[in-house]
Every structure is written in structure tokens, then in C-alpha cells.
Image (cartoon, rainbow, N blue to C red):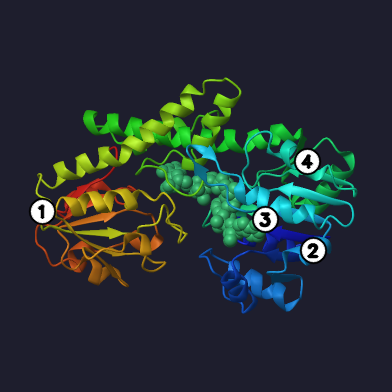
């Protein structure tokens, strides 16, 4: 198939590269010229394991190309995937990028095409797109095909999805979309065809449910801290019940990233539009918003209220491991609060320095040892593998240093044996 991905970010680039690897002819377009020129030179503008090899392999075989010429790329394609950002503005999904993309499609609808929303868009967005394009004389179908990939695991998630959801009432579009995904279906992925609105809601409901699961275990972790229980035991015991499942039950800092925070807020707004009170999702949002403050209060207790002039080292600052994405990372809120209290912040981040943290009181180091050398407190903020086997006594010079492991990577008993002042989450 000839495919055009509008938007070459985490979703457009990853899914475009994966579709090309399945033998399709893919053009990834973007309004960001620098991004496209980098991609044409084989430089991947985001950190995503395995993506570089995938892109280079398909560039070599001429199955993928990158372009700023949006009009021409739309004209020559049969399926157009909208993969632009849908950030929230005033707690509502801001669809300006989506509708700009639709504008480009409208003026280049030269033959039958399937227009697919892969961006996460609120219920009824497909209806609105259809209305805008209806004035065109050429036939088309608007399909919702939400994307469920996780950053850091994006390629695997795309190639082996739990399910492919196609929201359309058109038999023709459904047949073409099923054929496009056939190689994944043959490997065992479930395929479901629903109404377009259902597909749009499946995406938001899934993200909100996962965010709820995390928030639930985070609150149970708060209780464990006060009642001398290890949340790890509780999560294991709960997760063995197949109705609950063990995944997304890792207690930690507030959930972050470019999706859970914005999608939960946008879902509540959709509820409002349809006069439905989504009270569970609302309390998840407020519990998660409160979590940074809660962890900072805990940190104060760990430091005996002495934060002024203390060296605090963050290991990892992105919202999770395996990505360079800083969107809604807890570190963005925690670090300025600590600086206000007089702390000196050092950090090591495997994907390099972050402009979001630029300040005279924040210093980036390109290795763990130098970042931790003067640390009074080491905070394990993300769960990169390279943080899992550290010899803290060797990397720090301070005698009475402490470790706050926000990802529970270490065993409290081992730390006790090694006489390290160690604090985890929910233990
Ligand atoms: P992103 O910000 O990384 O990429 C979006 C890209 O679209 C940018 O490069 C931007 O320049 C480009 N763009 C904007 N307007 C354009 C236009 N009119 N024409 C061409 N290009 C345009 O965003 P993302 O993280 O890839 O997310 C995209 C969508 O997918 C969002 O709705 C998001 O919620 C959803 N989603 C994201 C993930 C994820 O892991 N990041 C997973 C599933 C779904
Ligand atoms: C999430 C979903 O998992 C994807 O299915 C979805 O496609 C995507 O959002 C999206 O819509 O964009 P992502 O945000 O990349 O993917 O990363 P996750 O692995 O889900 O982590 C999200 C946040 O939850 C992170 O802050 C992570 O640290 C936190 N988390 C996750 C926990 O605190 N505990 C867990 O057990 C799992």
C-alpha cells in the first residue's frame, strides 16, 4: 500500500517505519523541516531503541522516505495516517494540529483515500473530520485506528500488539485496513472492528484505566509506608489474580509522559460534553497531581528537614526509562521545588542533558560516578538497567549519604546489610 504519515514524531515515525518494514511504501511528512532533513540523512530525532536500524534498513530498500512536501505525499498515497500531537489546552484536547492536517488532506483528495486518525482524539473527532471533507467530490472514508505503543518499547508494541482496533462502518475501509495489518494478525494479534466513536473511546478508556491502576497501587504504597508492609508483596499477591493482572502495578513517582496526564484530563472533558461525571478518573488526576508534593514531603523527612545546601543527585530525569521524553516528567516539578529549598541538584541522564532543567543550580553529568560523587542524597527517578547494580559506597564520597529509590530497584534488606541509609516507595 502507499501510505502517508502526517507527523513524524514518536507515533508517526515508529509506525511509519514499521509499516515500511512490512513491505509498504511509506512517506513520513512533517512541518518541522529540521526533523525531515535529519531523517533524510539517517539521523533519528528521538530516542527509541531499535528505530535507527529499522529506518536505515527501509531507507536502503526505498520503502520509506521523508518529506516536507505534504501535498504531493498525500496525493500519491492510498491511506493517510494523522499522527500529529493532541496536547491539552484548558483541560481539553487541542485539535488544532489535527484540523491543520485535515486542511492539507482536503485540498489534495485527488482519488479515494482512507483517512485514519492514529493521533489520540476525543469521541466525535472522526465525525467532524468527515464533515469537513464531505464537501470534496472524491470518495473517502474516515477511520479511527488508535495507537497503543509505549515509548521505549514502541517497535515491539507495534509489531506485536495485543489488539488492532479499527473504528469504521465502511466494509471497504475495514477490508483494506485488515489487509494492511494482516502480517500482525497472522502472528497472533487480535483485530477488532468497531464503530468509529467506540474506537476513539477505547483509546481514552484504556489509558485512563492504566493510569487508575498505577494511581491505585501508589495510594496502597502510601498505606504500606505507614503500616510496615512492602508494597511489592501486595502487588505480587494482587497481580496473581488473573482478573487483576500483574502489569502496571509498580508503585513509583507520579505517572507522567505525553499521554496519561493529558488523556485523563481530556476524557473528563469529553464526559462533561456528554453530561457524564467521570468521578473515578477525576480522583485519579487529583491523586496523581498531589503525588509530587507527597514525595517531596517524604524526602524532607528522609533528609531530617535539612535540604539547604545539600547535594541531591537525580539518576534519570525523563518520565520513565527507555525514552528521552521529558513531557510531564515528575522531575520537572520536583527539581525546582528542591532548588527553592536551597538544594544543589546534579543529574545523570542516559539520553543526555535536558533544556527543561536548565538553571544555574542544576548540573548535568555524562556519567553516574561524577554525578553522585558529592551526593548527600541519591534519587533513583527512572528505572534504566544501568541503575540496577550500583555500588553506592564506591560512587559517593560522602559518608552519610542516603538513597531514595523511587522505582524500588534494590532490596531493602541488602541495603540494610550494607549499612546504606535506603528508602523506597511503599516499603
Ligand atoms: P510528537 O509531538 O512526537 O509528534 C507530532 C509531530 O507532528 C511533530 O513532529 C510535529 O511537527 C508534527 N506536525 C504537527 N502538525 C503537523 C501538520 N499539520 N503536518 C505535518 N506534521 C505536523 O507526538 P507523538 O508523541 O508522536 O503523539 C502523536 C499522537 O499520538 C498524539 O495524539 C498522542 O496522544 C498519540 N499517541 C502517542 C503515543 C506516544 O507514546 N508518544 C502513543 C500512542 C498514541
Ligand atoms: C502509555 C500507554 O502504556 C500506551 O499503551 C499508550 O499508547 C501511550 O501511553 C499513549 O497513549 O501515548 P507511555 O506513556 O509511553 O505509554 O509509557 P508507560 O509505560 O505506560 O508509562 C506511563 C507512566 O506510568 C510513566 O510515568 C511510568 O513510569 C508510569 N508507570 C507505568 C508506573 O508508575 N508504574 C507502572 O507499573 C507502569
Q: Secondary structure at mark 2?
A: loop
Marks 1 and 3, the one that precedes in the sequence: 3
Q: In the figure, is residue 289 to the left or right of 244?
A: left
Residue mark closest to the camera, 4 vs 2: 4
Q: Secondary structure at mark 4?
A: helix
Q: Secondary structure at mark 1?
A: loop
| Numbered label tally | 4
Measure the alpha-carbon separation of dots 4 and 2: 26 Å
Q: Which residue is mark 1?
A: 308
Measure the alpha-carbon separation of dots 1 and 2: 58 Å
Residue mark closest to the camera, 1 vs 2: 1
Measure the alpha-carbon separation of dots 4 and 3: 29 Å
Residue mark closest to the camera, 1 vs 4: 4
Marks 2 and 3, the one that precedes in the sequence: 2
Q: In the figure, is residue 136 to the left or right of 4?
A: right
Q: Residue at x 74, y 42 (%)?
A: 129
Q: Which residue is mark 3?
A: 159
Give the x, y percent position of residue 237.
Answer: 42, 32
Q: Where's the N terminus, which quadrant?
A: bottom right
The disc placed on residue 130 is: 4
Q: Alpha-carbon neighbours of circle 2 within 10 Å: few (<14), some, or many (≥20)?
A: some
Q: Is residue 154 visible?
A: no
Please tell me in which quadrant of the rendered image residue 80 appears: bottom right
Q: Alpha-carbon neighbours of circle 3 within 10 Å: few (<14), some, or many (≥20)?
A: many
Measure the alpha-carbon separation of dots 1 and 3: 49 Å
Q: Which residue is mark 2?
A: 24
Q: In the figure, is residue 215 to the left or right of 195?
A: left
Q: Residue at x 39, y 66 (%)?
A: 350
Measure the alpha-carbon separation of dots 2 and 3: 14 Å
Marks 1 and 2, the one that precedes in the sequence: 2
Amino acid at each position: 500500500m502507499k501510505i502517508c504519515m502526517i507527523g513524524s514524531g514518536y507515533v508517526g515515525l515508529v509506525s511509519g517505519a514499521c509499516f515500511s518494514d512490512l513491505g509498504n511504501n511509506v512517506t513520513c511528512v512533517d512541518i518541522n523541516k529540521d526533523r525531515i532533513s535529519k531523517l533524510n540523512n539517517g539521523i533519528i530525532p528521538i530516542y527509541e531503541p531499535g528505530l535507527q536500524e529499522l529506518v536505515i534498513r527501509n531507507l536502503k530498500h526505498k520503502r520509506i522516505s521523508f518529506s516536507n512536501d505534504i501535498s504531493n505525499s498525500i496525493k500519491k498515497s492510498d491511506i493517510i495516517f494523522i499522527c500529529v500531537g493532541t496536547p491539552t489546552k484548558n483541560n481539553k484536547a487541542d485539535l488544532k494540529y489535527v484540523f491543520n492536517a485535515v486542511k492539507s488532506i482536503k485540498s489534495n483528495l485527488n482519488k479515494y483515500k482512507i483517512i485514519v486518525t492514529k493521533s489520540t482524539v476525543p469521541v466525535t473527532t472522526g465525525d467532524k473530520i468527515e464533515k469537513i471533507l464531505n464537501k470534496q467530490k472524491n470518495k473517502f472514508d474516515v477511520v479511527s485506528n488508535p495507537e497503543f505503543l509505549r515509548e521505549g518499547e514502541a517497535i515491539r508494541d507495534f509489531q506485536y500488539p495485543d489488539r488492532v482496533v479499527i473504528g469504521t462502518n465502511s466494509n471497504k475501509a475495514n477490508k483494506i485496513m485488515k489487509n494492511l495489518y494482516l502480517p500482525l494478525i497472522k502472528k497472533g494479534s487480535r483485530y477488532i472492528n468497531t464503530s468509529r466513536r467506540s474506537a476513539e473511546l477505547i483509546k481514552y478508556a484504556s489509558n485512563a484505566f492504566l493510569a487508575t491502576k498505577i494511581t491505585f497501587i501508589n495510594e496502597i504504597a502510601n498505606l504500606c509506608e505507614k503500616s510496615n508492609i512492602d508494597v511489592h508483596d501486595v502487588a505480587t499477591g494482587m497481580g496473581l489474580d488473573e482478573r487483576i493482572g500483574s502489569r502496571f502495578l509498580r508503585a513509583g513517582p507520579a505517572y507522567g509522559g505525553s499521554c496519561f496526564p493529558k488523556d485523563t484530563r481530556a476524557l473528563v472533558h469529553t464526559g462533561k460534553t456528554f453530561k457524564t461525571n467521570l468521578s473515578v478518573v477525576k480522583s485519579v488526576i487529583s491523586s496523581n497531581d498531589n503525588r509530587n508534593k507527597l514525595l517531596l514531603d517524604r524526602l524532607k523527612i528522609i533528609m531530617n528537614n535539612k535540604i539547604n545546601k545539600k547535594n541531591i543527585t537525580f539518576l534519570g530525569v525523563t518520565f520513565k526509562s527507555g525514552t528521552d521524553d521529558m513531557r510531564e516528567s515528575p522531575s520537572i516539578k520536583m527539581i525546582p521545588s528542591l532548588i527553592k529549598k536551597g538544594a544543589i541538584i546534579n543529574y545523570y541522564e542516559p539520553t543526555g542533558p535536558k533544556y527543561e532543567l536548565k538553571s544555574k543550580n542544576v548540573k548535568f553529568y555524562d556519567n553516574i560516578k561524577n554525578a553522585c560523587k558529592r551526593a548527600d542524597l541519591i534519587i533513583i527517578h527512572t528505572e534504566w538497567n544501568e541503575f540496577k547494580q550500583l555500588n553506592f559506597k564506591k560512587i559517593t564520597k560522602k559518608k552519610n549519604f542516603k538513597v531514595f529509590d523511587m522505582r524500588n530497584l534494590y532490596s531493602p534488606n541488602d541495603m540494610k546489610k550494607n549499612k546504606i541509609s535506603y528508602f523506597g516507595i511503599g516499603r
